[in-house]
Image: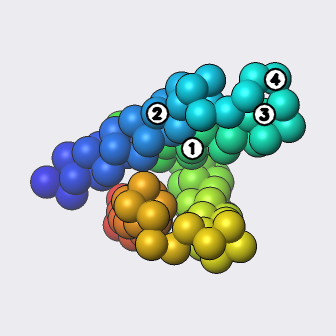
Amino acid sequence: MKRIVYLIVVAIAFLLGALHSTLTFVLQKWPSVDALWFFGTGLAQLFYSALNLILARQRAETDVRVIVRVANVLMLVFIGFSAQILGLKGNPQVMVLGATGILMLGLSFAS
């Protein structure tokens, strides 16, 4: 059951990353520095999700578990600082992203 919840959370985070990257071309003037940062943040979310997918899908070696857990902590810190600095604390997408980050961190330690 825990593995299924982990996979669902990873899927939600992956979809948020894909949506973020895709919306770059709708919301931002391309090419621009802002668009590159916006797109890069979506890519980071995709890679973050992919790392957690690796951990959720198979018995990972100790080094893989450590790498994923460190990435989860760093990404959660990044999400928190970004929301604070950009003034997006009440933004629904940021709240979902923060919730998935907290869940992925907790589930990565439970697996």
Front residue (pair 87, 104): 87
Q: Amino acid at mark 4?
A: Pro
Quarter in which the N terminus is drawn: bottom left
Asked if the residue under mark 2 is in contact with the one under mark 4, i.e. CB atoms within 8 Å, the reply is no
Quadrant in which residue 97 is drawn:
bottom left
Residue 25 badge: none
Question: Disc 1 to disc 4, how far (Cα)?
Answer: 21 Å
Q: Nearer the viewer, mark 1 or mark 4?
A: 4
User: Of label 4 and label 2, which has the lower sequence position?
Assistant: 2
Relative horizontal placement of residue 58, taking residue 42 as reference (left or right)? left
Is label 1 in a helix, a strand or a loop?
helix
Question: Disc 4 to disc 2, how far (Cα)?
Answer: 18 Å
Can you see residue 66?
no
**What x and y, as percent, mark residue 3?**
24, 50
Please give the residue where the numbered disc 1 appears in the rendered image. Answer: 45
Q: Nearer the viewer, mark 1 or mark 3?
A: 3
Q: Amino acid at mark 3?
A: Leu
User: Of label 1 and label 4, which has the lower sequence position?
Assistant: 4
User: Of label 2 and label 1, which has the lower sequence position?
Assistant: 2
**Residue ID at (32%, 50%):** 9
Circle 3 residues within 10 Å: few <14, some 14–19, many ≥20: some
**What x and y, as percent, mark residue 93?**
42, 55
Residue at the outermost right position: 33
Is label 4 in a helix, a strand or a loop?
loop
Quadrant in which residue 96 is drawn:
bottom left
